[in-house]
Structures are given as C-alpha cells and as structure tokens.
Amino acid sequence: MTDNQLNALEKLSNTVHLYEGDDMFQFVYGTQLYDSMFSLYANFNARANGDLMEVEEITFIGVNYKGNINLGIKDISAPVLAGDGALEITVTLQADDSTAITPLKTVSAGQEVGAGNYLKIIRELAPMSDDYYDAQKPILDRAFTNGKFDSEYFVRDGLFIKERPKDWQMLRSEDLILQNPLVMPGSDCKFGISELRI
C-alpha cells in the first residue's frame, strides 16, 4: 500500500444528516464478527434550536448481511457529549439466533449538537454465552452456545479449546487501533465515526 493510498484511507468519512421530523434510518456503523457482516442504522428524533439541533431520541436497528451467525443489539448506552465534540454511544452486540433484522432499540439522548460535532459509535461485543465469566463452568459450556462455537473469545484446533490469549484483546485496545487501524492485523472495527450535519 502506498503512502497516498494510506492517506486517502485515513480520510474516509461518513455523514449523518439531522433534520427535524426525519423518519429515515442512516448508516452509522459496520463490522465483521464471527465471519458475519453486520451494519447498524439509526434514526435521530431531533428538533431545531437556533444553530443547534437537540437530539431527543435515537432509535437503532441492526441488519445482518452475510454469515452463519446473526448479531443482535444487547445494550445501548445513553449518548454522552465528550470534550472533543463527539456524541459517544456505546453499543454492545451479541450473537443472536433470532432474525437477520434486529428489533428496534431506542435510547433517550437529550443532547444539543451543531457544527463541529460528530457521532462516535463505540462497539463492544458480549460473549455468546452468559456463562463465559463463570470460571467454575467447564470450558465446553463457556465456548459453545446452542452448538455454536464462540470464535471471538476462544480458539480451537480439533479437541483443543482455549480462551483467546490476552494479547488478542490487546490488539483490540483503543490505543493500538488508533496507531494504525487500517493495516493492523487482527484488529476489528470497534469504532464508527460520522460527521453530524444540521
């Protein structure tokens, strides 16, 4: 990859338009987990307040495009306006056996945004099994859920099953990903950044 190509990739952007009374869902985040492609869309219930828009509620929907394992939205944090101008929202995903389209999830926002603000989706991933954190349970109970192997938290080769090493989690840490997220092996799409336009 040339320096010009890398520089161009670092300037990729997504834009979210905020309009009063808008009922459209806009793309805010995409990832690949469990060899499945997943995207997150959001509808912003906002009203004009001078040069600002007050975002009252945000409704999310997820769409699974490819892969054998569907991802669902487990939890969404209340939006927080960070010091750098980012409207930060943490979305926790989890493998989900239901449908390709996730149920709508709405969070109250109560945040005013304007020129210079942007949306930052911070993606967390919950293990497939709620037993993952119970070290008393056998590894087979923690690594498999309904016959599906949790390849994001465990590795296996034949009968050998082990939790992913800690440096695997380190590869996902914000500090290392921010050093060079586009060419780092083993990293994943943990953040979605979108410019907010009003």
Image (cartoon, rainbow, N blue to C red):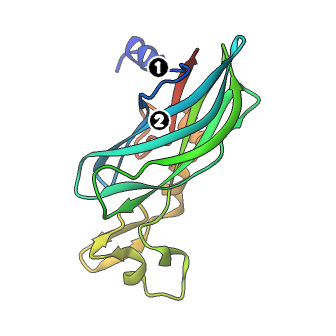
Residue 96 shown left or right of residue 170 in the figure:
left
Quadrant location of the N terminus in the rendered image: top left
Task: Point out which mark residue 42 bears.
Answer: 2
Residue type (three-letter) at the residue carrying disc 1: Ser
Labels 1 and 2 touching (C-beta < 8 A): no
Kindly indicate the quadrant of the structure image that contains residue 40.
top left
Q: Which one is closest to the eye, mark 1 or mark 2? A: 2
Q: With respect to residue 41, does 147 lie above or below?
A: below
Looking at the image, is 98 positioned above or below residue 156?
Answer: above
The percent position of residue 144, horizontal first and vertical second, equals 34, 76
Nearer to us in this view, 198 or 37: 198
Residue at label 1?
A: 13
Q: Position of residue 101 (x, y in %)?
A: 32, 49
Side (left or right) of 53 relative to 20: right
In the rendered structure, which disc, 1 or 2, sits on the residue that comes first in sequence?
A: 1
Question: In terms of image quadrants, where is residue 122?
Answer: top right
